[in-house]
Amino acid sequence: MDTRAKNSFSDENQRAVIMFLYFQKHTAAEIHRQLVQVLGKTALSKRSVRLWCQRFKEGNYDVKESRSRPYISDDIIQERIDKLEEAFDETRAWSLRALSAKTGLSRPMCHRIITENLKMKKILAKWVPRELSPSQLETRVVYCKDNLRNYNQQQSRLSHTVAIDETWVSLYRPPEKDQSKQWLRRGEKPKSMAVPDRFGSKVMIILAMDIRGICYYEILNQNEKIGFARYLEFLKRLMEKWHGNQQHTVWILDDNARPHRHASVTQWIEDNNIERWLQPPYSPDLSPCDYGCFHALKRAIGGVHYQNIGSLKQAIDNEISRGNANERYLAVQRLPERWLLCVNNKGEFL
């Protein structure tokens, strides 16, 4: 075809050819290739060919350029909505690509119906510690109601509450993704950060929080774990440091780990007139150390290679001092609020 003929072949003529070849079951890539073979540089782009093929697939056969959406009858729209709702009855985790293959609708059409007609948006699933059985949900509600009743009888009990838990801390913890952002000039590339093969030795930290923040903690020896004897020693030192000569009853909140519930620990608590808040199983969302301390503490000391346990302890000391001064670890104050939320959520995780 000579140059004059190529130039006289309008875009609308090309769209008519695209529709003809589309109905002959040619793919968008094949159609574009044929247009280029005949028309050369005057052929429509591959993206344009693909978009027009999608329009034909959706039932719009008007080859005139129009930025307005084609008219589609209400019956057809409802039929497409029904297809998508039927797919969502199977699972809510579809990708647009999978939905398109499932329903026969194009991805833009699927997205438009989902967002405009079904008023849906895709968000990450909520990760929870475990799936709770009906009886475990009921236990969470009952325990929280009992705790709220004790709190409402004498709200000053919260001032004499200490929450206790333990966690592992590594000599090296890589910074989180948002902590790895870098300021760059135009044209600069960010420095890459290799994921470490190992995070270094781990040590266990046992930590206590009261209404003012982190009040006491101990770092165990390397490879040492909490047993009932070690936990009992911690409790005795904690009470000496924290309780002192106070005349008020101390209330502690710890979880259901075996060392915490050992008979000798329970007996010592009873002998010293210490009360326990009820803590339902599998409930880190109701433990101040879990929901209000451990992640923030590890994040603050992360990104540094500590040479030994001593330097790690110093970093933890510094962070606890800063965090308490900035009122970053006041999670115990939120306990009544979280107990009430758990009751209102019928035991579901917060």
Image (tube, rainbow, N blue to C red):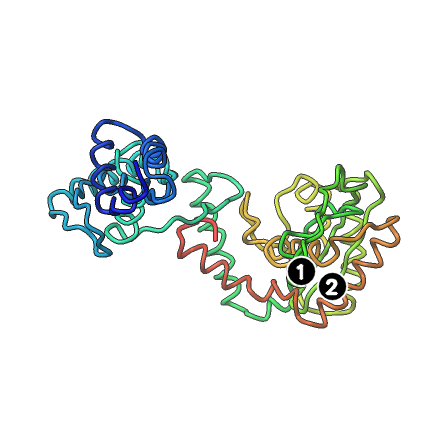
Check disc 1: other Cα within 10 Å, few if <14, some if 14-19, many if 20+.
many
**SS at mark 2?**
strand
Percent across and percent down for residue 82 are 20, 40
Q: Name the residue nearer the viewer: 251 or 227.
A: 227
Q: Position of residue 230 (x, y in %)?
A: 79, 44
The amino acid marked with disc number 1 is: Val
Q: Quadrant of the N terminus?
A: top left
Asked whether 67 or 288 is in front, the reply is 67
Tag 2 near tag 1, CB within 8 Å = yes
Q: Of the residues shown, which amino acid type is indicated by label 2? A: Cys
Reading the image, the residue beneath label 2 is 215
Corner quadrant of residue 26: top left
Query: Quadrant of the rendered structure where residue 256 is?
Result: top right
Give the structural element (helix, strand or loop) at label 1.
strand
The quadrant holding residue 343 is: bottom left
Please state if 349 lies on the left or on the right of 193 as rendered: left
**Res 203 visible:** yes
Mark 2 vs mark 1, CA separation in Å? 8 Å
In the drawing, what numbered circle is on residue 94? none
Residue 69 lies, in percent from the top left, at 21, 53
Check disc 1 and report the residue beneath it: 162
Q: Sequence-wise, which precedes: disc 2 or disc 1?
A: 1
Is 254 located above or below residue 335 in the figure? above
Image label count: 2
